[in-house]
Structure formats: structure tokens, C-alpha cells
Image (cartoon, rainbow, N blue to C red):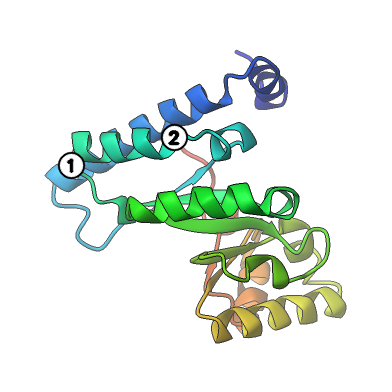
Amino acid sequence: MMPPGAFFPLAEKHGLMPYLDRWVVRHVLQRAADQKQQGMLRQGPLFFINVARATIRDPEFPAFLAEVLQEYGVAGSALCFEVPDPELAAAGAAVAEFARRINACGCRVALSGFGRGGVSFNLIRGFRVEFLKIDGSIILETLRDPVEFAKVVAIVRVARKIGVKTIAEMAESEAAIAKLRAAGVDFAQGFGISHPHSFAG
């Protein structure tokens, strides 16, 4: 077994990330198709999938996505693809085109790591995004630092005005979740919600 910290750099170095992302999409859709067959997809769930920089810039990925959605009989609305905030800052045009083609398949887009390098909503002007995932480095500080908590409140306020849902990354305790509720955050992920478990379980 190889830890992710060693595996992903190797996959990126050798141009394998688009293949890995396709593998992930296929397995998620298989899971979604199984749940649909069992009548479990009436109200969700929504599967979030991180995509690599190379996948965002891969012009063939949206066509692959449309094909496998049809193959498994799953609506695109069951998937949300996460684009890292730094990638949007570095390659806004490529990300916007990726989002446009992903949206055309019925899928959603989330901007992850929001606020890590400073809070700016200018990047998402003209860019359709359904979720802002507030960076975990901010969330971890909200219990002890009122400035970081105020930052979260401000992000939530603006996101609501523009019709975007917020997700707090790295919500690691019940105390953190209570604080996030007070800030008005819509959703949270982290050990305070659930520990990782087997995808097949």
C-alpha cells in the first residue's frame, strides 16, 4: 500500500490523474446506480468528487462524463465536481469552460479551499458555482479566533446574497459544528460529522 501523499505526486508526474479521476467517476456512478435501483436516490445523496488540474484542462473529460452518466442511468445532478480555489485563480478561463461543460451534463460545481489565500468573490463573477467550501485552515481557528469566525460569517452572508450554499471543511468537533451553525454555514464535513469509512460499506 502506498499513502496518498506519495501516490498522487507520482500520478501527476506521469500524467495519470485524468485516468484516476475517470476511475473514481465510474465507481461513484456504479454506487449511485446501485442505490437508485434500491430506491435510495429519491432525495439524494449528492456525491462530491475532487478533480485534478489535468482533468479540468482535459477537453475529452466532459464527453466521457456524459457517456458514463447515460451508461449507468444516473442523473448528472447526483454529482458535484470540486474545483480548487487556487486553480480558478490561476486558470479562470479553463475552469469556466470546464464548469460550463460539466453543467451541460447536469452536474454541479463546488469551489473548494475558499478563502485560503484571502477572501475574494471577484473570481466567481460569471462563473456558475453551487457551493463554496470554506477552507479548513479558517474553520479550525473559528473556536479561538474571533477574526476567523467573523470571516466565516462574512463569507456566509455574501454567499447567501448570490445564491450559493456554503460548506465548512474540517469541522472536527461538536463545538466547532455549534459555532458553524451560529455563523449560518449551510453544511459541514469533517470528523465532527463522521469519520471516513469504506465506500463499499
Task: Report the residue marked by disc 1.
Answer: 73
> Which residue type carries mark 1?
Gly
What secondary structure is found at the residue carrying circle 1?
loop
Nearest the eye: 19 or 3: 19
Residue 68: in sight, yes or no?
yes
| Quarter of the N terminus within the rendering | top right
Residue 78 in sight here = no
What residue appears at the point 51 percent right and 48 percent down from the top-left corner? 98
Residue found 72% across the figure and 82% down from its top: 154
Locate residue 89: give its quadrant: bottom right
Q: Quadrant of residue 103?
A: bottom left
Q: Residue type at mark 2? A: Phe
Q: Position of residue 108 (x, y in %)?
A: 42, 57
Q: Looking at the figure, which quarter contains the C terminus?
A: top left
Q: Which residue is under mark 2?
A: 61
Work out whether 65 lies above or below 134.
above
